Amino acid sequence: MLKDIDPLLIPELLAVLAEMGHGDELVLCDANFPAEAIARSTTHRRPVRLAGADAPAAARAILSLLPLDVDSPARRMEVSGDPESLPAVQHEVQAAVDAALGRPSSMSPVERFAFYDASRRAYAVVATGERRLWGCFAFTKGVVHPREESFESDERR
């Protein structure tokens, strides 16, 4: 156990988040997503499994550590046949994204099969136990800016 780190952030997921670079994408998917097959094409090569977590809880845990890209922070799988629809699970993850960014934002919708294709180019796939449909998201890693005081402390050494 570690202090102040969500217990959903298992060692494998912590390693993935630390290894990712600016612009890398992390796919967070529901239980119906073909995680095993798609993850084989990612950099990580296998899904990170959070079977006991729903998508919003997993998103909150991940976004507690993952800086989001400013220009393209998050995308969502759009509902087939109803691209403007926003199911409850997407509203809940949107709230987690907004909280992580500290401002309102909007997730870009991506058609289901285009989402599958893009997921193959992701750094990793995190497979949740989310049973609600359309609980699939992609987060783009941003940068962590240096703190001004860290430069001052380096100069004093």
Image (cartoon, grey):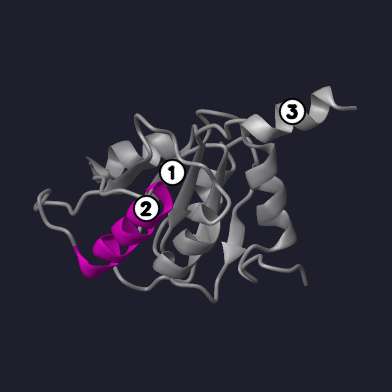
- Label 2 CA crowd tier, 10 Å (few <14, some 14–19, many 20+): many
List x then y, in percent, for residue 144: 58, 35
Amino acid, disc 2 = Val
Left or right: residue 147 versus residue 103 is right
Name the one closer to the observer, 112 or 69.
69
Q: Is residue 91 magenta?
A: yes
At x 17%, y 59%, the residue is 86
At x 35%, y 29%, the residue is 71
How many numbered marks are there?
Answer: 3
Amino acid, disc 1 = Phe
* Dominant secondary structure (helix, strand or loop) of the stretch shown in magenta: helix
* View extreme (top): residue: 155
Mark 1 against mark 2, which lies toward the viewer? 2
Q: Are marks 1 and 2 in contact (CB under 8 Å)?
A: yes
Sequence-earlier tag: 1 or 2: 2
* View extreme (bottom): residue: 52
At x 66%, y 67%, the residue is 4
Q: For the residues marked 2 and 3, what is the alpha-carbon distance in whole angstroms? A: 32 Å
Element at label 3: helix
Q: Is residue 32 magenta?
A: no
Q: Which residue is mark 3?
A: 152
Amino acid, disc 3 = Glu
Name the one closer to the observer, 111 or 71.
71
Name the one closer to the observer, 70 or 102.
102
List x then y, in percent, for residue 16: 66, 46
- Label 1 CA crowd tier, 10 Å (few <14, some 14–19, many 20+): many
In the drawing, what numbered circle is on residue 71? Answer: none
Magenta extent? 87-101
Sequence-earlier tag: 1 or 3: 1
List x then y, in percent, for residue 85: 12, 57
Sequence-earlier tag: 2 or 3: 2
Q: Which residue is mark 1?
A: 139
